Structure formats: structure tokens, C-alpha cells
Image (tube, grey):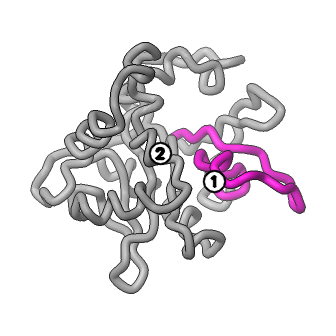
Amino acid sequence: MIVPANEASWSDLQAILKSANCHGCRCYCQRFKSPGSDWRTVSDEERAFRLQAQTSCGDPEARTTSGLVAYREGEPVGWVSVEPRTAFGALRRNRVPWQGRDEDKGDSGVWAVTCFHTRPGHRKQGIAGELAKATVPFARERGAKALEAYPMVVEPGDSVPWGETHVGTKAMFEDCGFVEVSRPTLRRVVMRIDF
């Protein structure tokens, strides 16, 4: 089962992000939201506070939320950050989304998928792929005109350290109907689906 984060509890989302060796323990999905100096000086507690406010966890009546939470047999197992691209202020300075493209950085109709987290013991079971698929109707139903992702290119047989693919993989987004619109680096692509 996958639900908007505002329909999940904050303790469920923390269980995913605070799990062992989880990149999210430091980030709380604020890396692409915070200006550079803010990112370096803000505590983990402040990042967690910001994510809690952004997700509106525990408030099913909230008008907005910033992601989706996956459950297996009632246990919280995965998270994906997805919301209007304009919510990610630090993306404006990141070359990956923009290199070789003439794109309006202020277009709030374009949404972005920026990161995934899967709890240890549940990885390599397709949870991230299920979350990626769920981002499509989630964004479309909330008025997005397009949805983008900035995943890693992982060739069959490649060994990729866990954590590098927190942005997802090209193949995972292809399976959801996204198409490659640019390849700003050897290992990163911009994938997009237009509604």
C-alpha cells in the first residue's frame, strides 16, 4: 500500500528515514530545498522539523504534502519525495536538471521526484519501483503538467554503492513511462513524463 505522506504518521516516516545506514538521517530530504549555507549550518533536528511540516504527516485533511510512504503488511518500508519542482530551490543551482535544456526554472506545473529511501531488510524487492509508479498519478491528480526525475544510469551487472541510487535508476523510470530528455553527465539523466 502506498499513501500520501500526510496520511502516514510522522513516526512511520521517521522509521524509514532513521533506519540503519540511511542517507536520510542527515538529509531529511532537505538537500535540494535548502540554500547552500543553510544546508551546512542547520541541525538534523531542524531538517526533521522542516520535513515534518512539509509532509503534514498525520493530517489526512492537509491540502499539500511532499511525498509518498509505502507499507508492506502494515509496516512502513519506503519513502519518495515528489512535489512541484519549484519547491526544490537548490535544484535551480544544480546543473543536472538544466544542462542542455531551455526550461523555465520557475514553472510550478512541472513536478520533480528527488529521492527514495527503503528500509534495510526491504531493499531490492521493488519498493522504489512501486513508489516511482505511484508518483505519476499522485502528481497528475494534483495538477502537474509534467513530472521529472534525475536518476542514475545503471547498466546491467554494474555494482553501485547503496545510497548513490537514492535518486532512482533510469530503468526504473522507463518502466513508469518516463522518457530521457537529456543526459547532463555520463551517469545521470533527466527523465520526464508529460501529462
Residue 4 screen position, x and y as percent: 30, 59
Of 52 and 41, nearer the camera is 41
* The stretch drawn in magenta includes residue 99: no
Residue at 71% from the left image edge and 40% from the top image edge? 180
Tell me the number on the disc at residue 132.
none
Residue at 60% from the left image edge and 71% from the top image edge? 126
Q: Is residue 157 above or below residue 151?
A: below
Secondary structure at numbered mark 1? helix
Are dots 2 and 1 in contact, CB under 8 Å? no
Q: Is residue 47 left or right of residue 36?
A: left
Instruction: Tell me which segment is drawn in magenta.
Output: 145-173
Q: Amino acid at mark 1?
A: Phe
Of 132 and 187, nearer the camera is 187
Q: Amino acid at mark 2?
A: Phe
Residue indicated by mark 1: 173
Secondary structure at numbered mark 2? loop
Comparing labels 2 and 1, the label whose residue is closer to the camera: 1
Q: Is residue 85 above or below residue 3?
A: above
Q: Is residue 145 left or right of residue 65?
A: right
Could you classify mark 2 by the number of other residues whose Cα lies within 10 Å: few (under 14), some (14-19), or many (20 or more)? few
Residue at 32% from the left image edge and 52% from the top image edge? 141
* The stretch drawn in magenta includes residue 147: yes
Residue indicated by mark 2: 195
Alpha-carbon span between mark 2 and mark 1: 15 Å
Location of the N terminus (image quadrant): bottom left
Q: Is residue 153 left or right of residue 75?
A: right
Of 119 and 125, nearer the camera is 119
Residue 140 screen position, x and y as percent: 38, 49
Residue 106 screen position, x and y as percent: 40, 17
